[in-house]
Amino acid sequence: MRIHQIFFDIFISLCLINLNINIDVATCNCLDHQQFFLLRLKENLVFNPATSKKLVHWNHSGNCCQWNGVTCRKGHNLSLASNDFNSSIPLKFGKLKNLRGLNLSNAGFHGQVPAQISHLTKLTTLDLSTSLASQNILKFQNPNIGMFFQNLTKLTQLYLDGVRVSAEGKKWGCALSSLQKLKVLSMSSCNISRPIDSSLSALQRLSVVRLNLNNISGPVPEFFANFSNLNVLELSSCNLSGHFPKDKFQMQTLSALD
Ligand SMILES: *[C@@H]1O[C@H](CO)[C@@H](O)[C@H](O)[C@H]1NC(C)=O
Ligand SMILES: *[C@@H]1O[C@H](CO)[C@@H](O)[C@H](O)[C@H]1NC(C)=O
Ligand SMILES: *[C@@H]1O[C@H](CO)[C@@H](O)[C@H](O)[C@H]1NC(C)=O
Ligand SMILES: *[C@@H]1O[C@H](CO)[C@@H](O)[C@H](O)[C@H]1NC(C)=O
Ligand SMILES: *[C@@H]1O[C@H](CO)[C@@H](O)[C@H](O)[C@H]1NC(C)=O
Ligand SMILES: *[C@@H]1O[C@H](CO)[C@@H](O)[C@H](O)[C@H]1NC(C)=O
Ligand SMILES: *[C@@H]1O[C@H](CO)[C@@H](O)[C@H](O)[C@H]1NC(C)=O
Ligand SMILES: *[C@@H]1O[C@H](CO)[C@@H](O)[C@H](O)[C@H]1NC(C)=O
Ligand SMILES: *[C@@H]1O[C@H](CO)[C@@H](O)[C@H](O)[C@H]1NC(C)=O
């Protein structure tokens, strides 16, 4: 599969410390080329054997699906979450055209989220979230969020917590309103401002909405009460004002409200 070449190019240049790598390969059995790719990946990494406790045991024996740090599942998912890459997101990720799930949360990537990620049109899950404590900050500046999600219409889960989206309500609302399959929208601490745009009311399937730690300075949008699957609604520290429309939120599905 294409994935090997891409990884070579990507990883050769990175110097990693504390590596804790989790890769989902495409089938339940470790295929020869996948094992080969993982071993070449290991060879090309500069790592500290004392701290990279999983990687250090990867070797030619056994089924790579049993290696510590490797998870094999059906599907086309890549998770490099919880690493310390300390670099920008490699542009070549954009060549992994069949990816369904991409998890780069707390992976130490920083800077602009490359437009190439927006070419992964089969994605159903995208997690770019970073914890507040992280010094590695991802941002949507150029390209901004305006066009980025235009073709990612299969997304059901989108996690951008801690990413500097830095856009006003109308802009990010319109940008996301075409994601009709979205069930999870998690955008806490994204530096978004101005009232939530009513275009978001199109996202009728939302069950989890997290927008806390932003500057939304406006009333609580009543249209959230129209989402018939809404389960979690987090709007704390958003600089909201006015009365909470509690008569609207008589929803049996709601299990967490913040
Ligand atoms: C090689 O891999 C096997 C199976 O995963 C493991 O039991 C063994 O400890 C590894 N050898 C080394 C030298 O790490
Ligand atoms: C991404 O990986 C992190 C760390 O393993 C995990 O906590 C998180 O739930 C994953 N995100 C998704 C969308 O599965
Ligand atoms: C990340 O890289 C920069 C410059 O390449 C370096 O100054 C910094 O110490 C690195 N941070 C970590 C946590 O390795
Ligand atoms: C990969 O697929 C599994 C099972 O389908 C799912 O639980 C997991 O969240 C997926 N990972 C990503 C990063 O999408
Ligand atoms: C979305 O796809 C269309 C058709 O392939 C293309 O013309 C357009 O440039 C794409 N948009 C983005 C933001 O990549
Ligand atoms: C937050 O967003 C505003 C624009 O809405 C921008 O001017 C400002 O620089 C952003 N702040 C940070 C820390 O990125
Ligand atoms: C919050 O947004 C309002 C306008 O919507 C703006 O006047 C104010 O400066 C913003 N506050 C911060 C801390 O950025
Ligand atoms: C909250 O919103 C008001 C009115 O838009 C604005 O003046 C103020 O700066 C905002 N506060 C914060 C902490 O963003
Ligand atoms: C909620 O849905 C009802 C019925 O579809 C509609 O009349 C109403 O305008 C919607 N309310 C909001 C705030 O979108």
Image: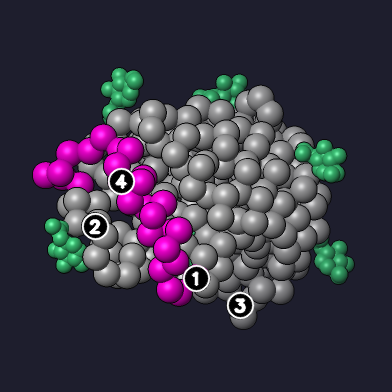
The range drawn in magenta is: 27-52
Residue 159: in magenta span: no
Quadrant of image for the N terminus: bottom right
Q: Is residue 69 above or below residue 167?
A: below
Q: Which residue is mark 1?
A: 27
Quick one: label 2, few (<14), some, or many (20+) residues within 10 Å?
some
Report helix, strand or loop for mark 1. loop
Q: Which mark is residue 59?
A: 2
Mark 4 — residue?
42
Q: Earlier in the sequence, mark 2 or mark 1?
A: 1
- Per the image, the residue denoted by label 3 is 253
Q: Earlier in the sequence, mark 4 or mark 2?
A: 4
Which residue appears at 36% of the width and 46% of the height? 40
Q: Residue furthest bottom?
A: 252
Under mark 1, the amino acid is Thr
Which one is earlier in the sequence, the residue at label 3 or at label 4?
4
